[in-house]
Image (cartoon, helix red, strand yellow):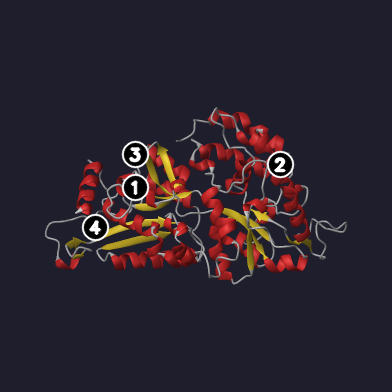
Amino acid sequence: MKRRVLALVLAVSLGTLTACGSGGGSGEGTAQEGQSAEQQTENSSGEKQEQVELSFTYWGGSYEQPLMEKIISDFEEAYPYIKVDSQHIPSDYEAKMSAMVAGQEEPDIAYIRDYMALDFAEQGMLYNIFDFIDQDEELDREDFVEDFFLYWEEGKSYGMYTAGESYALFYNTEAFEEAGVDPLPTKVEDALTWDELVDIAQKLTIDQNGNNAQSPDFDPEHIRQYGIRFDFNQGSYMPLVHGNGGTYMTEDGKFGLAEEEGLDVIEKMGDLVTKYHVAPSPAETKSLPSTAVSLTTRQSAIIMIGQWVLLDLGESGVDFGVGVLPKMNGEYSTSPGWGTVGIFKSTEHPEEAWLLWKWLADPSKAVEAYQSGLWMPLMTEWYTNEDLLNQWATGNVAHPDGYIDAVMEPALNNFHRHPSAYVKNFAEIDALVTPALERMYLGEETAQEAMEGIADQAESLFEGLYQ
């Protein structure tokens, strides 16, 4: 009965919207009079149900695609009247999503970068996910981790993160053993200071002659193993900026990365590359394999990245460990990813899109995605119920000893959103930040020159913060 109420609510909310933007095509899944028996099947209530086709797009690496296709296949088996036309987009996702939206060919349901979803939601293109949850007889808002909801206005959420995520340090245990370095601490209260992290990274950075970065004979031009590697985006520096008491943009429109707390972190990150030579520059990174592969091949001893890397590390068979991020001068901080699962209002099948959204958010329907290390749950009980926790977070190759302390606990207790989820006009501001950071990492500008050099432009683009 409640699903019929939901269908009525959604039909009313759609109003006069058509399916011109549905990636599902020309309305093959719409109810039509005289539909043949071959085009019908039974839903979970045993009622005759018209066949529905949903379009769904998602990103991810080579290991993620078969996992996602398995999850989708299980969904189709549970709902035989729904066919999911899934499209895996491994690269240039944002550009391709923008092109689909511009051509009014957006999918019914999709992975969306948070800063894009904020814009789409403000334009009225995405459903408020609470409209579905509040009408669902099986779920309540309280079933989910509150911090994982993403808002564009008070009381209006375009979705949650694609999954729970958390940044940490992941390391090659063989490299640590050969260098005589102790395993990284896994508890927040034991986190390394920045200087301790630098010292460890120096011991783990090895040139072609076997000298580490603390040796007077070290050759920084010919490095075979970097002590640490990180990506050159908000994921690498913002957890540390937040942990240093800083921010990306202040409420009154000041460029936070040019302020003392933010600049301190940016300078430290730059020193890893240009002063200590323990991390590759953007130019050097281009000649290296992916971040995960560089750890398995020992071209990097430590990688600072989100916990989704556990999927690749677990599949690789490498012996690896995990540690918490270093502590800065403020409260310890970690960050999630920057994506969501959104339902476009242009869909002809909002009820079925909701069923897929709910399936993806329920660990019991896709527990292999959690056991593999790709995702952490969005639902609270999968953290608080020991039996459920043990189903995914322990006893498998993707979750080494210390994972719960180093990754899961900080995600629940030391969580700060990336600025892409709360800074209006983020993409335009970040288009200034990224090349400025690259100039710093290449040694062309100091951190202060790079950040203060774009501060006025960044502040001129500032349009405020979201709820």
Which tag, 1 or 2, sits closer to the chain's start?
2
Q: Local crowd at mark 1 within 10 Å, few (<14), some, or many (≥20)?
A: many
| N-term-proximal mark, 3 vs 1 | 3
Q: Position of residue 451 (x, y in %)?
A: 66, 36
Residue 28 bears which disc, if any?
4
Most foreground residue, 115 or 414: 414
Q: Read off the residue under disc 3.
A: 124
In this orientation, which residue lies closer to the viewer: 157 or 233? 157
At label 1, the amino acid type is Phe
Give the x, y percent position of residue 391: 46, 67
The image position of residue 187, as x and y in percent, is 63, 55
Label 4 vs label 2, nearer the camera: 2
Q: Nearer the viewer, mark 1 or mark 4?
A: 1
Q: Earlier in the sequence, mark 1 or mark 4?
A: 4
Residue pictured at 72% horizontal, 58% vertical: 227
Q: Amino acid at mark 3?
A: Gly
For disc 2, the marked residue is 267
Task: Indicate the secondary structure of the residue bearing disc 1.
Answer: loop
| Residue tagged 1 | 344
Q: Nearer the viewer, residue 309 or 245?
A: 245
